[in-house]
Image (cartoon, rainbow, N blue to C red):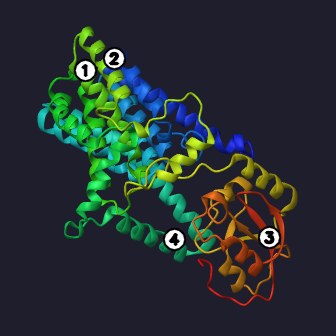
Amino acid sequence: MKLFGYDFWQFRLWSLISFTGLLFLIFLISYNLGGLIALVVVQLWLWSVPQLFIQFSYESYGEHTALFYLLLSFYTFYLSYTSKKKKYILITLSGLLFSLSVLTKYLFVISGVGFGIIALWQLLKQANKKEVIKSWGLWFAFFIIPIVFFELYRYLFLVTNFGTYAWQATTDDFILHFKSNGGGFNLKSLDWNFISKKAGFWEQVGVRFEIAWLSFLALSYFYFKKVKEEKLVLNMLLYFAFISTSLWFIFASPFGWTRHVWHGLIIGMILLITGITSMLKSKTSKLLFFIIFIVTVSTGSLINRDNFEFGFLLNQDTIDSWHAKRNEKGIQGLPSNPILSLKDQIGLKTFFSNNINDNDKVYYLGWLLVSEASPIVDKMFFSIDRYFKIGQINPNGGQSYLIFGPYQKGKLSIVGLNYHDKKVAWLCQEIVYENPSYTLCKLKSNLKYENKAYE
């Protein structure tokens, strides 16, 4: 963004590149572990559930980029066992890439549990323990160095610009967030009804969750006993990444957001297909499995066809139907966020570029941050409370604006029907820009403060 400027192609370029790389890795691993039939089935499965990945291919969410780094870390670690000459280079890359995955999304540290299990296994089984310690020491060094550098940068930036209290506050906030979002596991407070709903995350990709979990139980023995020795490491990394992520989501996560288990679901899809196809050793058996898979999809005997979308083109009605039913099973389904209007966002950005100055201030109401618009227009938004706190003036001499977003108006609104019009009448001097998703108005002065942001 700093190199090429702020516009839609720059904003989405890295997301598209990393997502393209992720697809390539998914296909490469599927082919490597299960052969051509597994590759084709995985491709068909992904194609038939576009709600699984549609928003990650163009929005700057962290999940797909973190998964790209994670799978690349797994694959380079696997390659270190097949190339003695490049072993240490590949181990170094694996540690570095896993670090980038964790820095992109801290949740992904759970998915690296396989590294620890393999390290322990090698220490117990291999005779040359010095070599094991040397290899894992190198891997860990390049895993931890980027994290240390980032934390040092964070500390220096916050302390230099805002003081020690800023660093302490953000650290405390991180710890609080960790404890309240699945880091403070408590066996006594488990909600088994909610847990059973979260265990059904397989339904989001059209598979009856009972079938998926029973298949994994049956395949677990195969993953470790029947695969070729050189592929065992890759299988272990993928298997434990799926298990650890799924267990955290089902038992520890306080939210039923499928997005939190999204990467585990992708890895699970790879394992399920490659495991089944690899068990069927002969070409005839693999062809038979492929035919059975197509028949199963067609008849819906083991799947939920409502979650499949086989059309070559997506229309707005399909996307709206996803949004309408994504919470119907008691957890948040996919896509995890509404697909916002690109036309409306471009219109908002164009208006900001032509009419909003650097010394102008833009405010939002309550917890409705309109956060997707802030990076698009390259402008920081502030809480309306700050406007009242500083005396309803702009200390920089510019204008003061209030912005409303797609969750406050239109078909994606999550507030009352009259919310938008009531707030405009109360707070706005005049509307300067409006489209179906966004409203921007000049704020009145001499307002009486009332905490009515959520009414």
> Which callout, 3 or 4, points at the residue further toward the start of the chain?
4
- Percent x, y for residue 308? 44, 35
Do the numbered discs 1 and 2 sit on residues whose CB atoms are within 8 Å? yes
Q: CA distance from mark 2 to mark 4?
A: 50 Å
Whether label 2 touches label 3, CB < 8 Å: no
Nearer to us of marks 2 and 4 is: 2
- Using the rendered view, name the quadrant where residue 36 is placed: top left
Q: Split into 4 quadrants, where in the image is the C terminus?
A: bottom right
Q: Earlier in the sequence, mark 1 or mark 4?
A: 4
Asked if 152 appears above or below 318 in the picture, the reply is below
Q: Position of residue 128 (x, y in %)?
A: 16, 31
Which residue in the protein does label 1 denote?
278
Mark 1 or 2, nearer chain start: 2
Residue type at mark 3? Cys
Q: Secondary structure at mark 4?
A: helix
Judge depth for marks 1 and 3 and give the one in front. Answer: 3
Amino acid type assigned to the residue bearing label 2 in the image: Gly
245 displayed left or right of 45: left
The image's mark for residue 167 is 4
Residue under numbered circle 2: 35
Q: Quadrant of residue 425?
A: bottom right
Q: Is residue 290 above or below residue 225?
A: above
Residue that carries the numbered disc 3 in the rendered image? 441
Viewer-proximal residue among 241 and 370: 370
Circle 1 packing at 10 Å, graded few (<14), some (14-19), many (20+), is many
* Disc 3: CA contacts within 10 A as few (<14), some (14-19) or many (>=20): many
